[in-house]
Image (tube, rainbow, N blue to C red):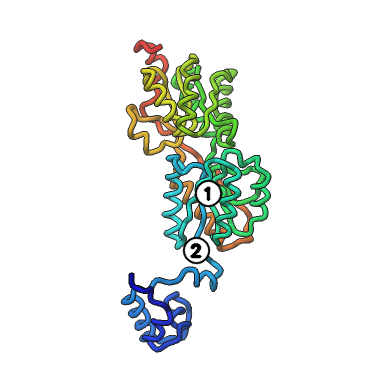
Amino acid sequence: MANKVTLKQIAREVGLSPASVSLVLNNRPCRISEENRRRIKEVAAREHYIPNQIARSLVTQQSKTLGLIVPNIESRFFSSLAKNLEQRCRAEGYALFITNSDGLAENDLELLNLLVTRGVDGIFLVVSDEAPDDRALFDELSNLTIPYVMVDRVMDELSCDKVMFDHELGGYMATRYLLQQGHRRISCMVNAAKTVTGRKRLRGYLRALREMGMEPDLSLVVESEYYISSAYEAATEVVASDATAVFASSDNITLGLLKRLHEMGKHVPDDYSLVSYDNSAADALFEPSLTSIEQNVGELSHHAVGLMMRRLANPSSDPVERVLKPHLVIKESVAPLAERQGAGAR
């Protein structure tokens, strides 16, 4: 492997100081003739000069790197979010370090400290399942000396930049649509015990039922973590109930439910109507296609990066909280109850 060319070598060849060469290659103001600028850039291009970002960081006090902490990189939603954030950060001239907390609050804290010691300029944080109740993480974030943006999952009591979707509205929209299709026995598979997002989606489910004058039957609320294996096990409760429809509050929960239904010879929407969450690209594999609540990842990452750039440019500005609206995407996994009954469905 060829040795990396240095500023000193370029300076020696063009007969100027390393400082002058550095100013030109970093597009900084300087009193250097156009001829010398051309010579410096010509030599740098010929020798494939690559700037030393570490050395530059010592001067500028900026690493041009950002960090991301997500609970589960295997989740279609979070992997898509990570991809979108990385692309947008790169367009802004930043590299993005992506880390995975496995949904554990203690890992959130460890990764936060790891990224800070690595010298990142800012952090995007999607907190783990238990984190909203974690005082150690709350205290660490309250005293953090670099910018951070909470994305999707947030600590409500923490004053900081935040961007999220309206999870309660999403749960409401999913349940309301099933009610409009004639369903009254609607199961809700949700991670309400451990997550703020789950509790908010459950509130939306309950609100939609009460608006219809129905007292919710809590036996139809089935707890499931945001993992396929957890939903697969929890789906037994759904099948044992008299539900005609299911609101599955994440894409992974949907996948676990569908796996269980397939093994039992049950079909969507013939046996159960289904509204999923996240509208992930994976649903293109399913027949019929899945009606879902869509959280536009591109929109979420656009606002997250915008807030980060704003904070980096003006560290003393007031915190901003943005709540985005989800959308109901209607496909083929919901059948009107009367139509199902007429076709001989249970």
Q: Would residue 269 be seen by someone viewing this image from the given angle?
A: no
Q: Amino acid at mark 1?
A: Ile
Q: Quadrant of the N terminus?
A: bottom left
Residue at 47%, 68% (x, y): give it: 53
Q: Secondary structure at mark 2?
A: loop
Query: What crowding class fits label 1: few (fewer than 14 Cα within 10 Å), some (14-19), or many (20 or more)?
Result: many
Q: 94 above or below 197?
A: below
The residue indicated by pointer 2 is 64
Q: Would residue 124 be seen by someone viewing this image from the given angle?
A: yes
Q: In the image, residue 104 lies at what x, y percent? A: 57, 41
Q: Quadrant of the C terminus?
A: top left
Q: In the image, residue 295 lies at what x, y percent? A: 46, 40
Left or right: 180, with 144 as reference point: left
Q: In the image, residue 68 lies at what x, y percent? A: 51, 51
**How far is mark 1 from mark 2, CA to CA?**
17 Å
Residue at 56%, 29% (x, y): give it: 202
Left or right: 153, with 256 as reference point: right
The quarter of the picture where residue 80 lies is top left
Q: Residue furthest bottom?
A: 15
Q: In the image, residue 162 lies at what x, y percent? A: 57, 48
- Residue 244's tag is none
Q: Secondary structure at mark 1?
A: strand
Q: Amino acid at mark 2?
A: Lys
Q: Nearer the viewer, residue 233 or 335?
A: 233
Q: Nearer the viewer, residue 336 or 153?
A: 153
Query: What crowding class fits label 2: few (fewer than 14 Cα within 10 Å), some (14-19), or many (20 or more)?
Result: many
Q: 221 above or below 66?
A: above
Q: 119 above or below 206?
A: below
Left or right: 105, with 182 as reference point: right
The residue indicated by pointer 1 is 69
